[in-house]
Amino acid sequence: MDGPAPAPGPPAVPVGTPFLLTCDTDPVKFFVSCAKGLEYLLADELLALGLPRATATISGVNAEGELPQALKVVLWSRLASRVLWPLAEFDCPDEGSLYQGVSSMPWEQHISPELTLSVDAHVSGTEITHARFAAQRVKDGVVDSLRAQGLERPSVNTEFPDVRINLSLRKGRASISIDLGGGPMHRRGWRMAQNEAPLKENLAAAVLMRANWPKIHAEGGGLLDPMCGSGTLLIEGALMAADVAPGLQRHGSIPPSRWLGFDREAWNALMADARTREQAGRAALKQVIHGSDIDPHAIRAAKENAETAGVAEAIWFGVRDVADVQVPSQETGCVVCNPPYDERLAADAVLYRRLGDALKRAVPQWRASLLCGSAELAFATGLRANKKYQLFNGAIECALIVCDPIAVPQRENAGQPRELSEGAQMVANRLRKNIRRFKTWKAREQVTCYRVYDADLPEYAAAIDVYEEDGGAGRTFLHVQEYAAPATIPDVDVRRRRNELLSAAREVFQVPAEQVALKSRERGKGGSKYGRFEQRGEFVLVRENDALLRVNLFDYLDTGLFLDHRPLRWHMAKEAQGKRFLNLFCYTGVASVQAAVAGAASTTSVDLSGTYLQWCADNLALNGKGGSQHQLIQADALAWLEAERHRFDVIFCDPPTFSNSARAEDFDVQREHVRLLRAAVARLSPEGVLYFSNNFRRFKLDEEAIKEFAECREISADTIGDDFERNPRIHRAWELRRYGA
């Protein structure tokens, strides 16, 4: 069912006038930041801490709750970097507006003159590009506001301020927040000594959570790190097992912020409860944690840190080569490890192989969560990963692999799976060949969703698309669409070939049946048609170029992402930077999202379906885009276009072949394309460009009629990606410009 048209955005606020956001009683929307790659884990953690809403976004979570709940996050979150409590928002097109907006806020309600302050700034845009300058202007606005009230100016302390203020300036909109944690929350307060390239504590917590360490500890299992360095993973694991709040040692008896709105009573109650839990947890902690490293200096630092953290008695440390890793006494447990990989510590594939071999020998039935410097280094371990995740250690992109168990029992006749028939083995061989062929292209273009098979073997007539999940469990999904078999092929052969195709695909990609979406054609009255779809309501997040997108692989014939248009979308996104972008027959709005993320000045997306427009809105929101800058219009695209008077710099028009909606006139692309293109060209700016595409195999462009109003050239060949080379007629595309452009 089509949803309602999008609601209008908030009323315009005069430039520089702050819109106050804090509220004493109602839940407040606030932001919890984290390292890239931890967003979904953090959202789960916040919900477990009792927040009513927590939605993952880029490098953080949009949360909702009351102030005491936000303070609980400050004290108990193991993954968060900062907790930003909003004070005000305002339009901020330039430096003057920033100063005006900040100085007009009632800062006497937030900070006393005797307190020190610091300002952190994060800016993006064209007018204000320097974060330190922006932070200075915010500081000036705060100080001048207080002096205007006859108060003394507060001092600045960039290291340990009483009140830390945060500015987020994005797309001409400024958000002013209080950093409730007072600074980076990865600091636990116990790190006194460190080895080279230490792991941040919140990233260590993520590795432990992916290892399922809390559950394993509760069941009596052990924890092992054979390359422990200064002990971050093991100490964090011990504190996690002992139920010690991450912020307890960091803050001690001093609240994290002296902001005047800080709820001291709620904070003291949280601290009292945390200390009670700590006392019970430390008393129950057992020595089931084992660490070793070849570097005696690293082990010395690890012991010092464990002593400071109060968990020295719970961890065994020793100087050992990875090949001589201790075999723990516990029958079950998990291995966590962060082998060397960055520019300071040489990454050695041989070392990774030695690590994998040692673990298979010492703890074959344990679980492992290994943070590796790259997918190639992860592969070098020789371990089969059940799950893979993309994480960032600072600016370094890492691969986190989870293996359960570490040593997978070898099947008989490995490499020639016994369950594959001769036909299925042919398909598997072709899939592996295509994977090798696409490897370089995928890496170069950073492609994660692609077509891997398109009836390469005619008797196995189907298209197989791969969708790699971004974040979450990092799962791989297969979307299989069966082509109609000739009527001369018996049904029994159709079913056999279908099953062989599926068996081969699952074997090659090592995916369970629940991660394979099959769109199978069934014969019946009226000819061949697709059978019933599943109703799972499951959306998977994927990434194309720089945009996150929601796809639904099971509930509809199409997934929400037309893979064949990937090159054209990327071309249009780059061309739309700083320009007005129009997307006609927008479907789920992927092209609009790509343009928005690339920096389009505005996007307008038109479709008759409210369902698709809501999907488009969700995709925009997922990438931090929204508001009046990105319009969603529910309308018959042709009728709207002929009534519209605004002009656009880049237009994308990809109409359906046919449409017979009850709410609009019947549409036939062959019949209506001249009228449609004439109306679209009329809406181009003088230097604008229109991209027209359709997938009607028998479509014939009326070139003579088009010549009357536009310059037109076919660009189909340039818009077909490497994965669609077998099917170059998957769509046709043209570029149209106004005469004289």
Image (cartoon, rainbow, N blue to C red):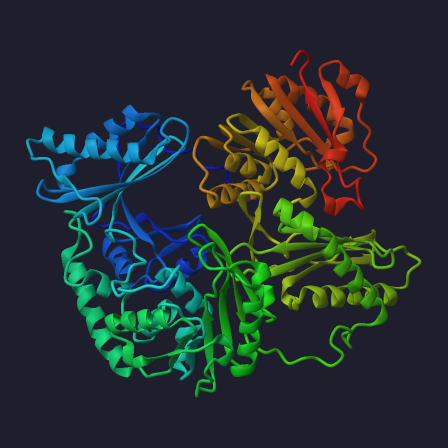
Relative to 340, is 277 above or below?
below
Q: Residue at x 24, y 57 (%)?
A: 71
> Residue 341 or 181: which is nearer the viewer?
341
Q: Residue at x 68, y 47 (%)?
A: 441
Residue 387: x and y, percent? 56, 66
Q: Residue at x 74, y 53 (%)?
A: 437
Quadrant in the picture for the C terminus: top right
The answer to whether residue 697 is left or right of residue 613 is right
Residue 656: x and y, percent? 71, 37
Q: Residue at x 73, y 44 (%)?
A: 722
The answer to whether residue 706 is left or right of residue 290 is right
The answer to whether residue 278 is left or right of residue 682 is left
> Residue 503 or 225: which is nearer the viewer?
225
Relative to 444, is 676 above or below?
above
Q: Can you tell which quarter of the image residue 284 is in?
A: bottom left
The answer to whether residue 218 is left or right of residue 609 is left
Q: Can you tell which quarter of the image residue 544 is in?
A: top right
Residue 570: x and y, percent? 61, 37
- Taking the view exactly as shown, the residue that stands out farthest to the top is 740
Residue 702: x and y, percent? 80, 23
